[in-house]
Image (cartoon, grey):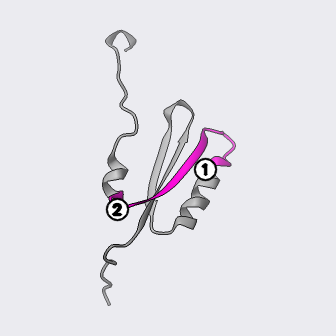
């Protein structure tokens, strides 16, 4: 039996930020699951991740592809 996707299903976006501009983003419909993922990332021994946020999103797919920071290179730095 094929199940249709739920209409107006709520998605949450997890954004975990860290040192040196590192950003990890993912989406899921279970907020508790995302909280567990975030806590595991913060507990990693390398210590790169420093904080997280979880928020409801009605445009989660497009939010996943939006750049967090634009990186600008100066020719002399290359």
- Where does residue 50 sit, x and y in percent of width and height? 61, 41
Q: Is residue 1 left or right of residue 42?
A: left
Residue 57 against residue 6 in the figure, above or below? above
Q: Residue at x 36, y 9 (%)?
A: 76
On the image, numbered disc 1 is attached to which residue? 41
Closer to the camera in the image, 77 or 67: 67
- Where does residue 59 sit, x and y in percent of width and height? 32, 58
Query: Disc 2 on helix, strand or loop?
Result: loop
Q: Is residue 59 magenta?
A: yes
Q: CA distance from mark 2 to mark 1?
A: 25 Å
Q: Quadrant of residue 2?
A: bottom left
Q: Is residue 8 left or right of residue 29?
A: left
- Where does residue 36 sit, x and y in percent of width and height? 61, 61
Q: Residue at x 45, y 64 (%)?
A: 28
Q: Earlier in the sequence, mark 2 or mark 1?
A: 1
Query: Disc 1 on helix, strand or loop?
Result: helix
Residue 2: which disc? none
Closer to the camera in the image, 55 or 74: 55
Badge 2 crowding class, 10 Å Cα cut-off, few under 14, some 14 to 19, many 20 or more, is few
Q: Residue furthest bottom?
A: 1
Name the image quarter holding the C terminus: top left
Q: Quadrant of residue 26?
A: bottom left
On the image, numbered disc 2 is attached to which residue? 58
């Amino acid at each position: 039996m094929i199940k249709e996707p739920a209409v107006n299903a709520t998605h949450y976006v997890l954004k975990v930020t860290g040192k040196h501009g590192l950003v990890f983003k993912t989406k899921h419909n279970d907020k508790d699951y995302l909280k567990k993922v975030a806590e595991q990332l913060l507990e990693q021994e390398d210590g790169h991740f420093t904080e997280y946020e979880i928020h409801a999103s009605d445009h989660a797919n497009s939010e996943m592809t939006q750049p967090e920071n634009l990186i600008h290179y100066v020719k002399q730095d290359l």
